[in-house]
Amino acid sequence: MCDLISHEEDAIQIISRFGLEMGVGEQTIEQVCEAYHVHTPTFLAIVNYKVFHKRVIPDDIDIPTLQRYLSNAHSYFLEFRLPRLRRALIEALIPADPTTKIPGLILRCYDEFVEEIRTHIAHENEGLFDEHEHDDQRITDKLTEIKNLIIKYYPGAHLQSPIPNHQPPITNPQSPITYLLISVMSDLWHTEQDFADHCAIEDDIFRPALTQEKPHTHRRYLLHETEELSEREQDVLVQVVQGLSNKEIADVLCISIHTVISHRKNIARKLNIHSTAGLTIYAIVNKLVDINTLE
């Protein structure tokens, strides 16, 4: 067990979610599992899946052991990782330009993401897997969106006035704020990957064990390039960030509600931004709206 933990970072998360602890001494994996009343083949199935990316799922998978793993994972996300990540976000975003509302909007996107996680986990705890079968990708996409908003629109002071091409680049020592931002981006990336793995374990191991279904095919997380918005899509976007409903937008622009909905879908697809807060950041940075007119 010591060799597994010391060589594989993900193994540390796995042993904690099975209720195992450090101080394993020279004991084997089987000896440690037996000491904590953990079903060894089920433990190894999760290790093989998450650490070594091998789908070796035993026929005698133990449901109570899996339930313990998933329950501890839920507690970890809700009680530790997500609150800690929020504090880190605040610490990294507060020193940004105080004249912009972008840090607050990024934080609002994060809070919406956390609420979706809470709802997702609540339904899992009630055993309602099928009702939220497609939530996993949407939730992971929202976390990717938060990362992209920071990468593209974090209000760094040196980006406000581009340096002329003939001048040499400014080389400043890295500030503590820069280190905080790097750290929080790393945390976001690890959280995204951890949650994606968690959902995959539910889909490919836990759900089939409960229902005797075949495992799902693996998801593919794709990167999207931003496309240019048409003038009409920009008009719709402005009204969206002003807080108008689809009907109100249709009335203002003299188009049908169906057309408004179609434009909104295209906007979300082109920008890969699905939250109103994220769209507001895009509109502010691209000078489609005056920040002083926004509530």
Image (spheres, rainbow, N blue to C red):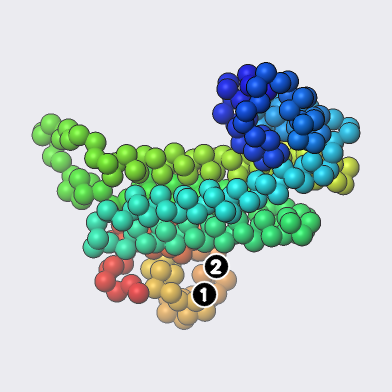
Tag 2: amino acid: Ile
How far apart are the alpha carbons under marks 1 and 2?
A: 7 Å
Horizontal relation, residue 208 to residue 277: left or right: right
Q: Quadrant of the N terminus?
A: top right
State whether residue 267 appears in this view: no
Quadrant (top left, top right, bottom left, bottom right) of the C terminus: bottom left
Mark 1 or mark 2: name the one nearer the start of the chain.
1
Residue 270 spot, x, y in % from top left: 47, 52
Give the quadrant of residue 293: bottom left
The residue sitting at 66% across, 57% down in the picture is: 120
Query: Where does label 1 land, which residue?
Result: 246
- Residue 121: horizontal and vertical position, in percent? 67, 56
In the depicted view, which residue is nearer to us: 147 or 195?
A: 195
Disc 1 is placed on an element classified as helix
- The amino acid sitting under disc 1 is Asn
Residue drawn at x 44%, y 62% as measured from the top left: 108
**Residue 262, quarter of the rendered image:** bottom right
Residue for badge 2: 261
